[in-house]
């Protein structure tokens, strides 16, 4: 049977992708950011899964404001990098896993989570930057990736509790797939940031570190934090953190923390990163 072995949590700052694509990761500004992922790149080599379920958000690249699914799972074979205004990132196409993705859709929809099913999808920095951070710049991504998109750009976003419960349904769904597959779940986005309005540039390190602590040790309670607290304390784009709760929900209560990293700033955000293994 398939099972989820580990979770990877990381920010998806687009400027991190640009730093890699433009070969400036060794600059004074970027060196400390990438240093925080050195352990992780080795860990990925040692713990390469068959498939990653990558929980991320689209930033009006594939879904414009006319159609915004709250939760969407991509069942296609291949996903191309999206053109976000400067041409597509020079990264490999993402290879999906249609059989597992269709099984997940069937399982969680019958488990009362109304996912939108997407067959064709271009993937933006929300998905490609985490892959770049963890895998570097390979010719091909080394495993399959199932994109699972969460709406955090158009009001109203789903609650943390709903995201956490969806994760729990995903864990059950993976466990009922009749093939031996090592699956990782990734939660991406965050941490605190606000890109617009009078509070643009807001970063709240105390909130972020508390979120990292509680995501590991008391995720069920953390999932009860209401939307308005994210906006007040972590900024309007801090709401991206609910996606980390989908991933944490798909893991066991007890996890081993393999790696934790926090750094301010990267572009307009705090970068946060965790690697958790199921125990
Ligand atoms: C920035 C961060 C994001 O999460 C995003 O989607 C776009 C920009 C930033 O820090 O600039
Ligand atoms: Fe974002």
Image (cartoon, rainbow, N blue to C red):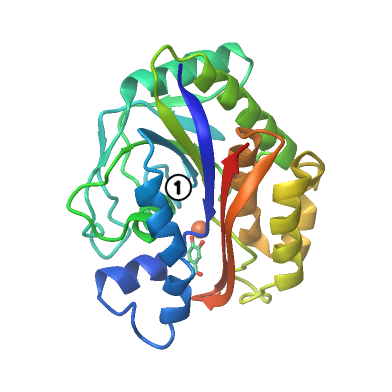
Please state the horizontal and vertical placement of residue 99, each as a whole percent of the image.
Answer: 34, 18
Task: Residue lying at the far left in this picture: please name it.
Answer: 139
Apparent side of residue 144 relative to residue 217 in the rendered image (left or right): left
Q: Is residue 46 above or below residue 24?
A: above
Q: Is residue 157 above or below residue 204?
A: above
Apparent side of residue 137 relative to residue 207 in the rendered image (left or right): left
Label 1 element class: loop
Please give the name of the residue rendered at 49% of the width and 47% of the height, measured from the top-left corner.
Answer: 57
Please give the name of the residue rendered at 22% of the width and 55% of the height, measured from the top-left corner.
Answer: 138
Instruction: Name the residue tied to disc 1.
Output: 58
134 or 77, nearer to the observer: 134
Label total for image: 1
273 or 93, nearer to the observer: 273
Please give the name of the residue rendered at 55% of the width and 42% of the height, measured from the top-left corner.
Answer: 151
**Quadrant for the C terminus in the image:** top right
Apparent side of residue 255 relative to residue 127 in the rendered image (left or right): right
Disc 1 packing (10 Å; few <14; some 14–19; many ≥20): many
User: Residue 219: which quarter of the image?
Assistant: top right
Q: Is residue 264 above or below residue 76?
A: below
Please state the horizontal and vertical placement of residue 28, each as a whole percent of the image.
Answer: 41, 88
Q: Is residue 250 above or below residue 28?
A: above
Looking at the image, can residue 188 be seen?
no
Please give the name of the residue rendered at 23% of the width and 45% of the height, measured from the top-left corner.
Answer: 93
Please state the horizontal and vertical placement of residue 197, each as a whole percent of the image.
Answer: 63, 72
């Amino acid at each position: 049977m398939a099972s989820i072995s580990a979770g990877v949590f990381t920010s998806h700052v687009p400027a991190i992708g640009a730093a890699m694509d433009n070969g400036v990761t060794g600059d004074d500004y970027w060196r400390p950011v990438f240093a925080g992922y050195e352990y992780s790149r080795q860990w990925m080599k040692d713990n390469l899964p068959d498939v990653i379920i990558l929980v991320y958000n689209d930033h009006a690249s594939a879904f414009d404001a006319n159609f915004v699914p709250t939760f969407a799972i991509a069942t296609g074979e291949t996903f191309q990098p999206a053109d976000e205004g400067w041409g597509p990132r020079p990264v490999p196409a993402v290879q999906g896993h249609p059989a597992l993705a269709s099984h997940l859709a069937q399982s969680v929809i019958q488990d009362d989570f109304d996912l939108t099913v997407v067959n064709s999808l271009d993937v933006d920095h929300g998905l490609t930057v985490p892959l770049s951070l963890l895998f570097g710049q390979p010719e091909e991504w080394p495993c399959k990736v199932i994109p699972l998109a969460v709406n955090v750009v158009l009001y109203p976003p789903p609650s943390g509790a709903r995201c956490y419960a969806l994760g729990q349904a995903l864990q059950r769904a993976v466990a009922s797939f009749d093939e031996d597959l090592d699956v990782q779940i990734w939660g991406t986005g965050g941490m605190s940031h606000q890109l617009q309005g009078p509070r643009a540039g807001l970063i709240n390190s105390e909130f972020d570190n508390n979120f990292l602590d509680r995501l590991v040790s008391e995720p069920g309670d953390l999932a009860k934090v209401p939307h308005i607290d994210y906006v007040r304390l972590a900024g309007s784009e801090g709401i991206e953190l609910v996606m980390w709760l989908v991933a944490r929900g798909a893991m066991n209560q007890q996890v081993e923390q393999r790696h934790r990293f926090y750094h301010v700033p990267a572009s307009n955000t705090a970068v946060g990163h965790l690697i958790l293994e199921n125990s």
